[in-house]
Image: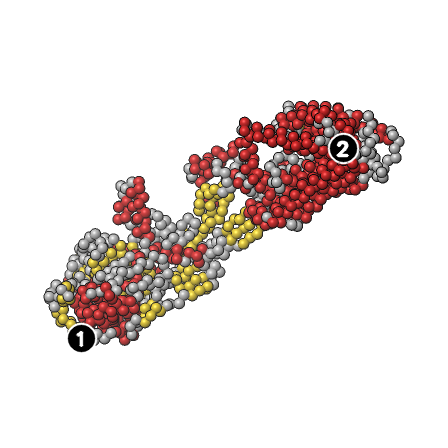
Amino acid sequence: MGRGKLKRSFRNGEKKQPMDITFFVLVMCLLTIGLIMLFSASYAYAFYMTGNSFYYIGRQLAFAALGVAAMLVISRIDYHILRKFVYPIYAISVLLLVVVLFMPAINGAKRWIVLPGVGQFQPSEVAKFAIIVIFSHYIALNYQKMRTLKKGLLPFVLLLIPVVGLMVLEPHLSGTILILLLAGCLLIIGGANLAWFGVAAAAAGGALAFLVMFTDVIEYAMGRLTTWLDPFSDPQGLGWQTVQSLLSIGSGGFFGLGLGQSRQKYLYVPEPQNDFIFAIVCEELGYIGALLIIGLFAALVWRGIVISSRAKDRFGAMLCVGLVLQVGIQAVLNIMVVTNTIPNTGISLPFFSYGGTSLIMLLAQMGVVLSISRSAVLKQ
Amino acid sequence: MADTRKLSLKMKKRMRVVGVLLILLGFVTMGVRLFYLQVIDGDELQQKAVNQQLRDISIAPGRGSIYDRNGNILAASATVWTVTISPKDIKESQKEEAAQKLSELLELDYETVLAKMQKNNYYEVLKRKIEYDESEKVKAFCQENGYSFVSLIEDSKRYYPYGNFASAVIGFTGVDNQGLSGLEAYYDDLLTGTSGLVVSAKNGWGQDMPFQYEKLYSATDGYSLVTTLDETLQHYLEKQLEAALTEHNAKAVSGIVMNPKTGEILAMASKSDFDPNDPYTILDERLKASLEGLEGEEYTTALSNAQQYQWRNKIISDLYEPGSVFKVVTAAAALEEKVVTTDEQFYCSPAGVTIADHTFHCWKAGGHGSLNFFESMTASCNPVYVEMGQRLGAERFYSYVQAFGLTEKTGIDLYGETNSIVYRAQQMGPVELGSCAFGQSNKITPLQMLTANCAAINGGKLMKPHLVSKILDSDGNVYKTIEPTEVRTVISAETSQILCDMLEADVAAPGSNCYIAGYRIGGKSGTSEKLDSDDPDARVASFFAFAPADDPQIAVLIFVDEPNSYSQYGAVLAAPAVRRFLEEALPYIGVQPVYTEEELAKTTISVPNLVGSTLSQAKATINSKGLKVTYVGEGDTVVKTVPSGGNKIPQGGTLVVYLDDSETKTVTMPKLTGLTPSQASATAGALGINIHMTGDSTTKTATAVSQSIAEGTTVSVGTVVDVAFQANVARE
């Protein structure tokens, strides 16, 4: 999606509408709040770790600026261009998932590709996008035969297997779950036979039973499960991160300690700029602030669905809903982890968590949504 | 390929369902979950968070001091430092080297230090209570090496400037400055004060965050105690107790000095005792010897017992049978109940007195024969007191035992007072009543005995003995004054007056060993069997005295526990110690001696400086002093005198005045010890030696026990020799 192809967006000479301003404002609100909270959450940690309180916010601001620029540019590019690169995008993402297996492990998992001088990124982020694009493409193609096994299920399963398989090898459990949920949502919306999901659920149950009965996964899982059910049973060890997160959230109370007033960010919550940033948000902004942010995410999802339903074609609609659902599901999973509603898995909070490449990718994808909004058919 | 068809209705529907489900299941449940965490559980979680975020460092308050009645410091605290480390802040690679260096600096065991460094916490004590100099060294050393994990925490240490002085009363403190015995324990809460607190924020690594808030609750130093003890009197008492302990090879010698009118304890000690600066070291030679050769558990047990023994305040914690000192109580009861009159005659039969098949013999073989009420005290005649007991009857006798406070704790401000073991009225048959009446059978503490006897001689009021008169706050202002407490009136002032006269007569009688010229002293000796001792011959020799007899200001009880000496009698072993104590104490407390003529003859005067004066001037001066004089030489001016001017010479002694350069006349000092007062006086007088008698020289049968100039020494004629006499007449 290079700049050179900009003029293609107007090739049909269709009348262009302005982008959906509501969605844009929601994105900018989340981004702004996210940046402010990143600064607040990270400065103590940054100071202790690097000696520079502005270490994380400085970088994130630069990436955010780049990301917003990319979003605005992309919003003006006809999203159909993606359809031409469906296979390359998919192939590249699979390739990257292979490459990452040769990268050094961080905390026992190979999730990051480090590009010296540029930064690091997770191929799973690319894979999510690739799956959304290629699923949207096939759903748009096969929409009439979505209830059939051959057209409505098989291609999607075949596309998923390499991606999911490689991600399990990393291992990247949370990313895998996210992709599976996203794929499921797209298939359901695309018109797949709901009975298959019953079968899939049964198969998943069977697989789980198999694992429990014939492998020692249960032993590994029990440790995490115990920590999940009662993190205070091991507050210094496995439960540390969760316990500190809960203490932060609880400390916030209804109105919060005030912006910048978190105490838990002083080396209690590990890496407060990453996955657990929402705990600091809750501590500083309280229940009120947390609800506001959750509301913004919900509004973003809902506005995405509205844009999707107005999209001028099925590909655009599927792409749009896929992109906003990805943000929504990721936000929900992150908050569930932070509040210890589900076991702790590494999953970041869109617009908030530190990470340059993922922020740029997120904003670029929001640009795609805005691009779709420009071609919306407002009146039937 | 371009797909221009829009979404089907079904797809739109499904999209909305998915969207709604996500929002409902995801966002709404998260909203509910957060409400639960932040609003319902919020306070609890916040409390937990605050607990980990804040560090409380307690600031030890300064412990109050203990003063004697004149403001002399008996116990005080000084600042010392405790060296602590934060093991988690030490780098693994640094530990061995740091342990090596610190163990050398602090003179600690390397392995122990290393083990502490390897612990997984933030606080370990390396060494307690180091002094200022050492703390400065540690500070400098840690700065030099960048050992930021070492902290010096201010602490305090107790100092007892007088060492083993009043230690049973003052007590001592433990490592945490907590009072463990004596006043330190009894007034621990007041002395300790209130700890302060520094609350500071810390980060997840346990480091302080000085830019965060810090709250200081300052410590309140403890109260100080002004005791009723008098450092000087305590010193006089301990000197006599120690001398008696050594001289009589006793198990223990204890003494109490009280103001009989107020119950204030002026001095209290039990020898041998311990040094509160180092309470765990055994000071007593006999105890030390008993520990030698023991090993292992046997040693530990024996050491612990020995420590307990030396810490124990025998005056309040040990019971004894007071013996004849108790006769004061019986006499008081008998007088008060008017079962005797002061001019009544008693008869002490050689056959003793038989009560219900039991015959009480007097301690004096053959009995005392006929004697009056006053003489019964001096003679310490047991049958007379058995008789008094019988006349009173068990009920009345017991009611006085109670009234004198012998059935209850005195309530002195010390822990460890023992309950007395006393026959109650219904337990006392006539035989028990008989022995109780002269001081056997009932077991009480020495403090109870002294308190009761003080009530008998102070006008009849039982005073509560106490050690603290004032409590001062940390600024030195009086926080509380403890006034003398009268427990009850026991006997009438008239009865008390009779008892004073009676006891004064006892001391004045020959052989009391407590007579001091110029002073009116009352007293009573006691010798009691120790029925619970392994040694059937074990005795307690005690003596109670007070002065002046017409206006008692000071009362003393000294008792010698299990003496191994030439005598076991209280009048022989304990009375001289009391007398020597009073000889120093009475002038100190400001009691002026008033001499009778007979006494005046035994006092000394200062020799006037006559050198250079003419014969007539000298004669006039000497006459006015009442001295006899021998002139040597032919001159008209005094060249020298023996003794020379300014020295002491006994009243009525002979002064040798030289009027020219004649050679000084000399004689050889004879042996005076072992002689009676009159023999010694005659022997010395024949040689022209002036004799100054001290001790019980009024008793004709007393013998000289020491002379200040050794036998065989060549001395000038006119020299004064001090000779101490002691009565060893059969007086119980």
Using the image, name the chain to which the residue with label 1 belongs: B
Q: Amino acid at mark 1?
A: Glu
Left or right? Give the position of B247 relative to B194.
left
In front here: A138 or B406? A138
Instruction: List the residue tagged with mark 1.
Output: B344
Asked whether residue A3 appears in the rendered view, the answer is no
> Residue sitting at 46 percent across and 64 percent down?
B478
Q: Position of residue A294 (x, y in %)?
A: 69, 43
Give whichever of A144, A31 is nearer the camera.
A144
Residue drawn at 42 percent across, 48 percent down = B175
| Near-viewer residue (B218 or B14) | B14
Q: Compare residues A239 and B60 and report the one nearer the observer.
A: A239
Residue A318 is labelled as 2
* Residue at disc 1, secondary structure: loop
SS under mark 2 = helix
Whether residue A326 appears in this view of the structure is yes
The relative height of residue B300 versus residue A164 in the rendered view (above or below) is below
Q: Quadrant of the N terminus of chain A?
A: top right
Which image quadrant: the C terminus of chain A? top right
* Coloring scheme used: secondary structure
Locate residue A274 relative to residue B427 in the image: left or right: right
Instruction: Estimate the x, y position of residue A98 in percent, counting from the top left.
Output: 67, 23
The CA distance from mark 1 to mark 2 is 131 Å
